[in-house]
Amino acid sequence: MMTSSELIAFEEDIAADFNAAKVHAPVHLYSGNEDSIIRVFENIRPQDWVLCSWRSHYQCLLKGVPPELVKAEILAGRSISLCFPDYRIFSSAIVGGVVPIAAGIALGIKRSFEDSRVYCFMGEMTAETGIAHESVKYCRNHNLPVTWVIEDNGKSVCTETKSVWNIESHWWEKEPASADMVSYRYQSKYPHAGAGQRVQF
């Protein structure tokens, strides 16, 4: 498994390429969550599925996708939709897009008695949406093998998530610890998109 310093070095390399106009599509970079995401991946096996959103470089690398392959896809403009079926990892730029897919894969696993699990990563804004609530409830009620990983950077693009919903705390923060839910907070040094020197959105 890659180390925290190796993950950071990979993202810094991508940031430099983006600022040098070598990437002709949006990129969403991680920063500040390396130790937390590595702890999550300590439980993820090769046969497990990983689903995530437009910010998925770290997940791909930690799932075992070779760094040169991840970078090639980013340089080809597919940073926000990295999919590597051979490694059982999929991502989507659609907000909440992978959440019901995670539920469907988990249902298939249960019905086929397969020894695998789904790990679905989402931001705290996605976790507050209706599709997330419905998917989590369905999976819990049907005892499906899925772990929801909520990565809380406090923002929905450039707006504070709690301000958007006019709330003081998120729903999962009020729940007791559970085996199917992992959450952590982090603060990135990068903007929502890009690396801070070119046009952002």
Image (cartoon, rainbow, N blue to C red):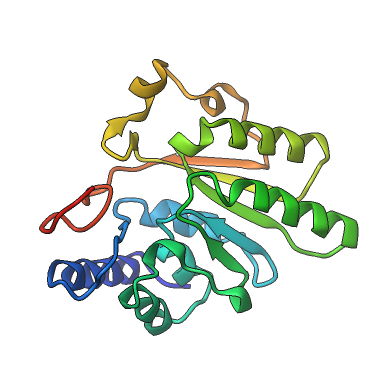
Residue 26, image x, y percentages: 29, 60
The x, y position of residue 61, in whole percent, is: 45, 71
Residue 77, placed above or below residue 137? below
**Which residue shows up at 37% across the image and 66% down it?**
79
Instruction: Determine the image quadrant of residue 14.
Output: bottom left
* Residue at image location 42% in from the left, 20% down from the top: 165
Q: Tell me which corner region of the image, top left, top right, bottom left or bottom right, holds residue 194.
A: bottom left
69 in relation to 81, above or below: below
- Name the residue rendered at 59%, 30% in the picture: 130
Position of residue 100 relative to residue 162, above or below, is below
- Relative to 198, 76 lies left or right: right
Looking at the picture, tell me which residue is in the foreground, 49 or 99.
Answer: 99
Where residue 38 appears, x then y in whole percent?
46, 59
Q: Position of residue 195 (x, y in %)?
A: 19, 58
Task: Identify whether 32 is placed above or below 155.
Answer: below
The reply, left or right, for residue 70 in relation to residue 28 is right
Compared across the picture, whether 174 is left or right of 28 comes to right
| Residue at 52% from the left image edge and 26% from the top image edge | 173
